[in-house]
Amino acid sequence: MAHSLDDFVVDVTDTIRFAMEKIELNKHRAVVVVDGSTVVGVVSDGDIRRAFLHNVLPIAPVSGIMQLNPRTTTESDSSKRRQLIQDARVTVLPVVTDDNSLVDVELAYEPFDAA
């Protein structure tokens, strides 16, 4: 099933609430944080929960809670990317160019339909 890259991406200046909405939409428990087109981090639903437990406001930027230096890949072979995502134990693996620009995401699973 095809996915929209936009459902998995937030800008470094976007709010935590916006990241939460994207995670709810994409059903993969994480979003990739970009600065322009460069991958700078990842935010998971767990990061958001921990932020709220520490009284971080939903209007705060994701840059304050993102995981820096996320696992990424430049691998173009989809079967190798699937193996990488299993090995890394992540739900969303950013696929990047040599200069760390986001081109796609490899997903650990297909979500169940909400219908």
Image (tube, grey):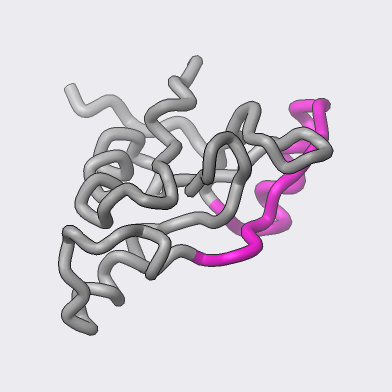
Counting labels gives 0
| In the displayed structure image, the side of residue 46 where residue 106 appears, left or right | right
In the rendered image, residue 114 lying in the magenta stretch gets the answer: no
Q: Residue at x 68, y 56 (%)?
A: 71
Q: Is residue 66 above or below residue 11?
A: below
| In the displayed structure image, the side of residue 90 where residue 45 appears, left or right | left
Residue in the foreground of this view, choosing between 110 and 9? 9
Q: Residue at x 20, y 52 (%)?
A: 17
Q: Is residue 63 above or below residue 76?
A: below
Q: Quadrant of residue 79?
A: top right
| Percent coordinates x, y for residue 26 in the rendering | 35, 35
Residue in the foreground of this view, choosing between 110 and 96? 96
| Percent coordinates x, y for residue 46 in the rendering | 35, 66
Q: Residue at x 48, y 48 (%)?
A: 33
Q: Is residue 13 above or below residue 79?
A: below
Q: Quadrant of the C terminus?
A: top left
| In the displayed structure image, the side of residue 24 where residue 11 appears, left or right | right
| Percent coordinates x, y for residue 27 in the rendering | 34, 39
Q: Quadrant of residue 36?
A: top right
Residue in the foreground of this view, choosing between 107 and 96? 96
| Percent coordinates x, y for residue 56 in the rendering | 21, 74
In the rendered structure, which segment of residues is drawn in magenta? 67-90
Q: Residue at x 53, y 45 (%)?
A: 35
Residue placed furthest toward the bottom:
54
Q: Is residue 67 above or below residue 94?
A: below
